[in-house]
Image (cartoon, grey):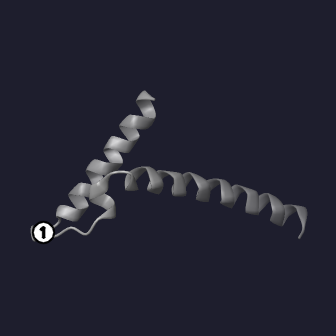
C-alpha cells in the first residue's frame, strides 16, 4: 500500500471509530436496543433524538 493510501485509511478509520463510539453510547440506553412495541408514529425517531441528546450531554459534562 502506498503512503498516501495508508494516510487515507488512517483518516477514514479515525472517523469510523468516532461514529462507532457514538452509536455504542446511544445503545447504552435500553430504549434503543430493545424492540419498540409502541404504535405511535415517529416515536422511534423521538427516542433516537433523545438518546443522542442525552449521550451528547454526558460527553460534555463528563
The residue wearing badge 1 is 41
Residue 44, position as x, y percentages in the image: 23, 64
Residue at 25%, 69% in the rendered image:
35
Q: Is 59 left or right of 51, judged from the image as shown?
A: right
Q: Is 12 left or right of 58, judged from the image as shown?
A: right
Q: Which residue is situated farthest in the right direction here?
A: 2
Q: Quadrant of the N terminus?
A: bottom right
Q: Is residue 48 visible?
A: no
Residue 58, position as x, y percentages in the image: 39, 36
Q: Is residue 29 above or below residue 45?
A: above
- What secondary structure is found at the residue carrying circle 1? loop
Residue 43, position as x, y percentages in the image: 17, 62
Residue at 85%, 62% in the rendered image:
4
Residue 36, position as x, y percentages in the image: 21, 67
Q: Quadrant of residue 8?
A: bottom right
Q: Is residue 15 visible?
A: yes
Foreground of the two, 51 or 4: 51
Q: Residues within 10 Å of mark 1 (few under 14, many from 20)?
A: few
Amino acid at each position: 500500500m502506498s503512503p498516501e493510501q495508508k494516510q487515507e485509511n488512517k483518516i477514514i478509520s479515525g472517523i469510523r471509530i468516532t461514529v462507532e463510539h457514538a452509536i455504542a453510547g446511544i445503545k447504552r440506553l435500553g430504549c434503543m436496543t430493545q424492540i419498540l412495541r409502541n404504535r405511535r408514529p415517529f416515536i422511534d425517531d423521538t427516542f433516537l433524538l433523545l438518546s443522542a441528546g442525552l449521550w451528547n450531554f454526558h460527553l460534555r459534562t463528563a
